[in-house]
Image: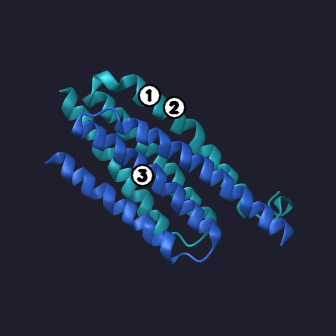
Chain colours: A blue, B cyan
Amino acid sequence: MFIEIILVFISLSIFLSFIVFIKSKKLQDKIVSFDTMSIISISLFIILSISYKEPYYLDIAFVFALIGFIGTIIFARFNTLRSKYA
Amino acid sequence: MLDILGFIFISLGVLFLLLSSIGLIRMPDTLSRIHAGTKASTLGTLLVVIGAICLEHTLWLKLSLLALFILFTNPLSSSILAKSCIKNLEDIK
């Protein structure tokens, strides 16, 4: 019962940051909301691994952390180069 | 006793995650959005990790490694992102 309420709140926060991802016009806002979504989904996978008692979900959390970090840095670099040369 | 402590930590962490995503909607500017979205979600994820360690003792190594990774990489990525948002750094200095 407790885990379901927690999962509902985490899904609500992912949905709110996805609304920001859809509605924002600039690239920087999209990168920020993507970063926040990846961090929130890491904690979603941690709670799923606790509730199902499967340690494999933690590997998915590691992969999400790596992909969120590298994707944020690559898009920030792209934003810097685009504002410099365009 | 330890289960109740873990539930309290996980509830606090989820509250911080929800506050970070609400702040992402409410804030008007990109730099204040970075301020709202990254710091609160880092604290929320660390609290969720602490609560998960309280609930499942056998997974402590993987969970603390994940917490260390998040603690190192998340402020770094937000700093690089904030530096890329500023067109020329000499306006700020």
Q: Total number of numbered labels? A: 3
Residue drawn at x 43%, y 41% is: A61
**Which residue carries the number 1 mark?**
B64
Among the 4 quarters of the image, the one containing residue B22? bottom left
Residue drawn at x 47%, y 38% is: A62
Image quarter where the C terminus of chain A lies is bottom right
Q: Secondary structure at mark 1?
A: helix
Residue drawn at x 35%, y 48% is: A44
Among the 4 quarters of the image, the one containing residue A46? top left
Image side of residue B30 versus residue B7, left or right: right
Chain letter, disc 3 residue = A
Among the 4 quarters of the image, the one containing residue A10? bottom left
Label 1 – label 3 distance at C-alpha: 17 Å
Q: Amino acid at mark 3?
A: Ile
- Classify mark 2: residues with Cα within 10 Å, few (<14), some (14-19) or many (20+): few
- Classify mark 1: residues with Cα within 10 Å, few (<14), some (14-19) or many (20+): some
Q: Amino acid at mark 1?
A: Ser
Q: Secondary structure at mark 3?
A: helix
Q: Amino acid at mark 2?
A: Leu
Label 3 – label 2 distance at C-alpha: 16 Å
Q: Is residue A23 above or below residue B23?
A: below
**Which residue carries the number 3 mark?**
A40
Chain letter, disc 2 residue = B
- Classify mark 3: residues with Cα within 10 Å, few (<14), some (14-19) or many (20+): many
Q: Is residue B8 above or below residue A7?
A: above
Task: Tell me, yes or no, whether the two marked residues, 1 and 2, touch with CB atoms within 8 Å.
Answer: yes
Label 1 – label 2 distance at C-alpha: 6 Å
Foreground of the two, A50 or A63: A63
**Which residue carries the number 2 mark?**
B68
